[in-house]
Amino acid sequence: MDRDILRAGKIVGVHGIKGEFKVHSFIESLDLLQPGNEVLLQKNDGEHRAYTVRKIQLYKNILRMAIDGVDDRNAAEKLIGAGLFIPRSMLPETDPDTWYWCDLIGLEVFTTDDIYVGRLTSFIETGSNDVIVINDGDAETLVPAIASVVIDIDLESGRMRVKLPEGL
């Protein structure tokens, strides 16, 4: 998949007999998956296809979804494990100095002294502030995603500069 298509979830099961399935969502806003919106499903064999959302419902942290062209349980079962993607163009514009996590994954991270820390691989959501996960081989560094630590982000050069807290 290219950077114009973003992973929004994964089909993890089926619901009922009318072709509905369960989705583990990776996005915060269900507005992107409303009926009439287009999604792209990528099956385990790499095949992908566009579908139109017919129905969406949040139930206990799992989405129940129906799409045009999948009308029975057997068809829905064939989609278990498929990735659910949306066009990047559906995302709202960000404010200056605000980024989507997907844009930051893969950045090379350096300290303010130009010491290489590693590559940003993921984020951890916490109650107070998110945490950046940086990997360099077997070494993993966790840093808070706050303005006093993240000094600069340059998407064009693929770099992030951080001021590591004492002890890291």
Image (tube, helix red, strand yellow):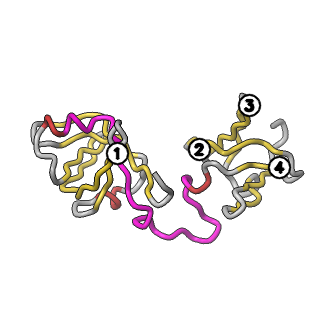
Ranked by sequence position, the earlier of labels 3 and 4 is 4
Residue 109 place in picture, x, y as percent: 74, 49
The magenta stretch spans residue 148: no
Give coordinates of residue 136: x percent, y percent: 73, 36
Judge by depth and name the residue closer to the eye, 158 or 28. 158
Name the kind of residue labelled 3 in the image.
Answer: Ala
Identify the residue under disc 1. Answer: 42
Disc nearer the start of the sequence (4/1) = 1
Q: Is residue 148 left or right of residue 132?
A: right
Q: Determine whether 163 is above or below 133 in the image.
A: below
Residue at 20 percent of width and 34 percent of height: 77
Question: Mark 3 packing: few (<14 Cα in 10 Å), some, or many (20+)?
Answer: few
Q: Amino acid at mark 1?
A: Gln
Residue 123's label in the rendered image is: 2
Q: Which residue is labeled 3 in the image?
A: 139
Q: Earlier in the sequence, mark 2 or mark 3?
A: 2
Q: Residue at x 77, y 58 (%)?
A: 151
Instruction: Report the residue marked by disc 4.
Output: 111
Magenta span of residues: 76-102
